[in-house]
Amino acid sequence: MVDGQTLPWILSEILQATGGELVCGDQMQGFENIGIDSRGISPRDMFVAIVGDVHDGHMFANDVVQQGVGGLIVNREKITDLPIAEWQAQQIACVAVADTTRALGDLAAFHRSRTDVPVAAITGSNGKTTTRQMTAQVVAQKYNTLATISNYNNQIGVPLTLLRLTREYEQAVVELGTNSPGEIARLAQICAPDIGVITNIGPAHLEGLGSLDGVMREKEQLIKHLKAGGKAVLNADDRRVYQMARRTDKDVLLFGLSKNAGIRASAVTEKTSGISFSLHLPNERLTVDLSVPGHFMVLNALAAAAVGNLLKVPAQEIKAGLEAFQPAWGRMDIFQTENGIHIIDDTYNANPESMKAAITTLRTLRRNSRSLFVAGDMLELGAQAEALHKQVGAWAAAANIDKLLINGEFANAVVAGAINAKMKHADIFTGTRDELLDTLKQTLKPGDWVLIKGSRGARMDTVVKGLKSWAGVNPED
């Protein structure tokens, strides 16, 4: 049932949004929502048959029709494989398009324009997910806010987020990800941001983007595709992002530790339980106590505060939103075992800059205790992968990490970097994830701090789960 807040669709609007061809059906046929999951589709929804890396939605077209769905959007090249005559007899609507993934984005762009809810979009090499979560917490202090869930930051996830917009929402906060040229431009076209945030530029997704300058050009597309009158929120402490501020003709609000930042921090103090700092807003200064560790978290918080400031969220509510933030699983999530071992789960993802930041945080938190670093591969680094993994080893050695345990294709490169930086062979171990886990069980002592990190595809989260099981910690905690 349409609840009065949901904006329903009619087939003529779907044709208008996608530029698709009506294969069969009545242009005045109505639908409540757009869906892509055959397992959870409602009979009143329009099903979009997405072709993914694993599944092809066209394989489930008959299933959704049998479930009562009255309309489908399919790839034009798949028409001959589908029972169009049967659908026509059943009064099923079918729209053919060149690319169903692009059509999904076109539908989201159409829907975003008709709801006219202001959108803040966030991208960057590091910290974009945390910044998006913090920003949503801040903005939600004043407005009914729709935000990206999970890792819905690509050409399927962003449209699915925007298609959730209803009349009840007053603001939206979305995250934009990329691993190849042109993706940010497309996502920005879809969400038409009123505010665009760039956290930083670092060596992430180099396999697709080529170089740091390639990363910069890709991320900068967000600023170039802001709506007329849109505002850019940019990191004053990042050289490449600051260059964007000097190039754009859009209004810019800078954040950072730099004196020229309009939203800045001072008196940063790291603690075992988190980090505190003085937040400088244009007309006010107040203390913020984050419940997550890591100096880099301050910049994420400043970006969120900058968006809040632009949206006229009161200073005390900005503070409340930041202090309410809790990390998602695998992002600097710290837990302590009964015998006093501290485990830092940062396994959600990894690239060189986030590796360096995590190692720095471990060095700070461990104080005088022993520290262990369990590292998996960083993925999608292309030709620079070996050199960048060597840097990880060097950073671990420079941070005086006591034990380094490594898994993955580039384990030997990490070892070489650590050895070159004077780490002892006896303090380095390589092996499978199971072997690393067994070694940890034999090595860890009360008071130790252990950091576990790697790209999502490296599956270092299995080591965390194994440690939790061994330590008697609930895997869901």
Image: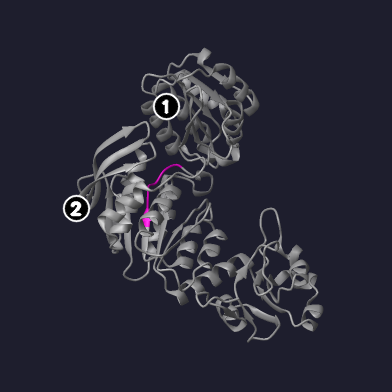
- For label 2, the residue is 284
- Taking the spot 54% from the left edge, 64% from the top edge, the residue there is 159
Q: Is residue 471 above or below residue 4?
A: above
- For label 1, the residue is 395
The picture places residue 98, in percent across and down from the top left corner, at 64, 71
Residue 31 visible in the picture: yes
User: Is 226 left or right of 339, judged from the image as shown?
Assistant: left
Decide which of 419, 426 is in the foreground and name it. Answer: 426
Element under disc 1: helix
**Labels 2, 1: front one:** 2
Element under disc 2: strand
In the orientation shown, which residue stands out farthest toward the front?
338
Q: Which range of residues does the magenta coloring cover?
A: 197-203
Quadrant showing the C terminus: top right
Estimate how packed mark 2 is, as few (under 14), some (14 to 19) or many (20 or more) residues with alpha carbons within 10 Å.
Answer: few
As for residue 198 lying within the magenta part, the answer is yes
How many numbered discs sit on the rendered protein?
A: 2
Decide which of 201, 348 is in the foreground and name it. Answer: 348
- Taking the spot 64% from the left edge, 73% from the top edge, the residue there is 45
Along the polypeptide, which appears first: circle 2 or circle 1? 2
Q: Is residue 94 above or below residue 315?
A: below
Q: Is the C-beta separation of discs 2 and 1 under 8 Å?
A: no
- Taking the spot 51% from the left edge, 25% from the top edge, the residue there is 338
